[in-house]
Amino acid sequence: MTAYLILHGWQNHRPKDHWQHWLADRLTELGHQVVYPQLPDPDDPELDVWLEELARHLAGLDAGAERVVVAHSLSVVLWLHAAARGMPGLDAVDRVLLVAPPSGGMLARRPEVARFVPPPLEFALPGPTRLVATDNDPYCAEGAGILYGDPLALPTDVLAGAAHLDLDAGYGPWPAVLGWCLDPTAEIIARPA
């Protein structure tokens, strides 16, 4: 059994058709521990509250299992803030998938999420971490590989034409992410059209 923590982004109320909900359901059906919390106030989130929730949910993962975090959008920068602050428990995570982070510039322009502007990327992420982004994400026009992948020396998969990898981009079921969850060497590709 593996223990998974799946973290959603800004304005995400965990809709049933979103790939993260689909992923949580598939992993649960396979007998894994899955924690997919609704983070407080997703439309107007507080960074410190989300950090407290992250710490609480990490502490609740089965200590005897492999521990995997899958974060999308705003929760990617949440993870970066946690790492920059040296949050206890992060080093107990075995691997992390960061999907479609927004740029700091985009966050700064939105008062509801301006507190989430990423910290300076002058730290090392604990454990193996992989970044998945797209070449046309409206929330990260500069390119996540350039903004995050290069400075943090992360293996980065850039998918063509997949926007923000959310429901608006057609990201319901996403078999490649399930494949990665079950095998970290699996290739992450765009979902079938």
Image (cartoon, grey):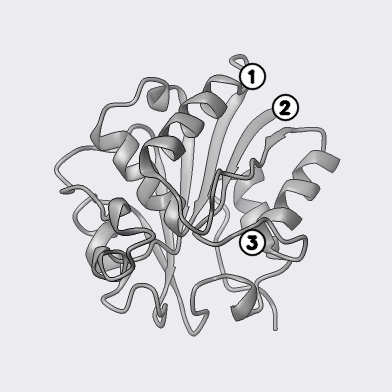
- Please, what secondary structure does the residue beneath circle 3 have? helix
* Label annotation for residue 62: 1
Judge whether residue 159 can be spotted in this image: yes
N-terminal label among 1 and 2: 2
* Relative image position of residue 172 (x, y in whole percent): 71, 69
| Secondary structure of residue under mark 1 | loop
Residue type highlighted by circle 2 = Met
Q: CA distance from mark 1 to mark 2?
A: 9 Å
Report if the CB atoms under discs 1 and 2 are less than 8 Å apart. Answer: yes
User: What residue is shown at x 14% (from left), y 43% (from top)?
Assistant: 122
Of 56 and 169, nearer the camera is: 56
Distance (Cα) linking label 2 and label 3: 19 Å
Q: Amino acid at mark 1?
A: Asp
Q: Which mark is residue 20?
A: none
Marks 3 and 1 sit apart, C-alpha to C-alpha, by 25 Å
Mark 3, other Cα within 10 Å: few <14 / some 14–19 / many ≥20: some
Q: Are marks 2 and 3 in contact (CB under 8 Å)?
A: no
User: Image quadrant of residue 74?
Assistant: bottom left
Q: Residues within 10 Å of mark 1 (few under 14, many from 20)?
A: some
What is the crowding at mark 2: few (fewer than 14 residues within 10 Å), some, or many (at least 20)? few
Disc on the earlier residue, 3 or 1: 1
Residue tagged 2: 1
Query: In the image shown, does 126 or 51 lie closer to the viewer?
Result: 51
Residue drawn at (46%, 27%), measured in percent from left and top? 55
Rendered location of residue 110, percent (x, y) = 33, 68
Q: For mark 3, what is the residue?
A: 176
Amino acid at dot 3: Ala
**Compared with residue 173, is residue 181 higher up or lower down, i.e. above or below?**
above
Residue 119: percent from the left, percent from the top?
20, 47
Left or right, 27 with respect to 149, comes to right
